Each structure stands twice: as C-alpha cells, then as structure tokens.
Image (spheres, coloured by chain):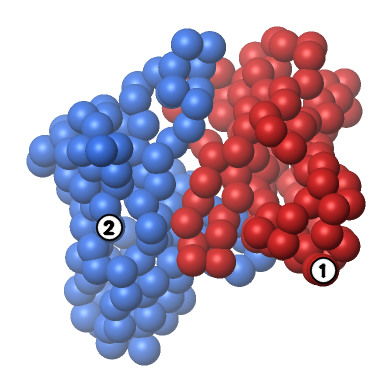
Amino acid sequence: DMKVTQMPRYLIKRMGENVLLECGQDMSHETMYWYRQDPGLGLQLIYISYDVDSNSEGDIPKGYRVSRKKREHFSLILDSAKTNQTSVYFCASSSADWGGANGQNTLYFGAGTRLSVL
Amino acid sequence: AQKVTQTQTSISVVEKTTVTMDCVYETRDSSYFLFWYKQTASGEIVFLIRQDSYKKENATVGHYSLNFQKPKSSIGLIITATQIEDSAVYFCAMRDFNYNVLYFGSGTKLTVEP
C-alpha cells in the first residue's frame, strides 16, 4: 500500500518549545521533502532529502532542521518554535527519477500536520 | 524568485459548465515538467495531470485537459462538465529537468455551485 504517513496530524505548542514532526513512507522512495503551506502562498519547500543523511536546504530552511537516518523516515525539527512557524506542514516522497519521461508521475504527499505555535 | 504564478485566487462556476484556470511559470531549462494538483477540503493533495515541455500535444485525463502555450510560458487547466465535487483548491506546479524539486503556485480556489 503506497502511503506517506505524518504524525501528529494536529499539534499545539508554545513559543520557545521544541517541535518534532515525523514522516514515514512505505515505498522505499529515495527522495523525501518537507513543505509548508500558508494561505496565499501555496506550498514552499523547506528541505529535501535525497537519501539517508543526504539533506539539502530548500527555499525557506531558516528555523528548521531535518533528520533522515532511515530511508523510510524523515523528521522535521523546530528548535525553539516561533509564532510565525504556525502553518500546515506536508511531507512528500518520490522515486529518484520521478516526473521524468519514464518515472512516476508525481510526488506522494502525506495528509499534513497542522501546527499552531502560541 | 517565484517560479510559478497563479493570479486567480478564486473562481465560482455553475455545475456542468467549463472552467479554465490560469498558470504561468519561469524557467531557464529547455525541458521541464508541469503539473496540476487538487487539494480537497480535507487537505489531501491529489495529482491530476501533467504536461512534459517537449510534447506539443496537450495532455488530457478524464474531464481535465491542459492548454499548454510554451511561447507564453503558460499552462492552463480546463475542467469540462464541472461537478460539485470539483470544488477544491487547484495548484499548478513545475519541475525543472535537472532539479528534483516541485515548485508550486499559490493556488486557485474553485467553487462549483448547483
């Protein structure tokens, strides 16, 4: 069953607390992503991971870090969360050749985590 | 720099009519891939249709089709015979040939009314 699972689905934290968002996939995909979605801005890439311990910053990495110790698992960490990190966070995964002429058509997205930082 | 632009923030149509959603993009690559996604009310993001830049024929899947105008860097989504359940937010997205990342537009909210 091809699935990307995000935990938790909803999270409320206070400013300054640490936050851990977790993502798992069962497709043995090499590449995984963290996006955040804010009203009027679409989805913005935070980090991309090409495989275990091979991570790169996306467009908005400030205030975030990631960890990928197993291919099927990708974590997003907010050290000392800020109120402007209130958002919906999406994890996604793909094969290395996705979107190309012979690859899979798409990224596979999780259901999202709604994070509120008070 | 923003790579994908959707200027229509919301559209409202009557059921069974046709709607077109606009999208323009920027890229330096000669080859790239364009996608449309639908985000349902529950937040689920669903892949709809794609267009490869080197293909001249517009892609069609079910009641979704694309209007690809490469000289204008434009990829419009056309939904024919709209249904109530087509109400959702639609995102245009692009992947450059050499970079394994999907860039999204800001989305267009479609409301289909009876």
Is B88 on the left-hand or right-hand side of A88? right
Q: Nearer the viewer, residue B85 or A29?
A: B85
The amino acid type found where label 2 is placed reads Gln
- Given the image, on which type of amino acid does mark 1 rest? Pro
Q: Residues within 10 Å of mark 2 (few under 14, many from 20)?
A: many
Element class at badge 2: strand
Query: Which quadrant would residue B66 be assigned to in this image?
Result: top right
Is residue B57 shown above or below A29?
above
Depth order, front residue of A101/A16: A101
Judging by colour alone, the chain drawn in red in this rendered image is B
Q: In which quarter of the image is the N terminus of chain A?
A: top left
Point out residue A24 in the picture as x, y percentages from the top left corner.
21, 47
Q: Colour of chain A?
A: blue
Q: Where is residue A109 drawn, in percent x and y? A: 40, 47
CA separation in Å, label 2 and label 1: 35 Å
Pointer 1 residue: B114
Q: Position of residue B31 (x, y in %)?
A: 65, 14
What's the mark number on residue A6?
Answer: 2
Subunit ID for the residue under disc 2:
A
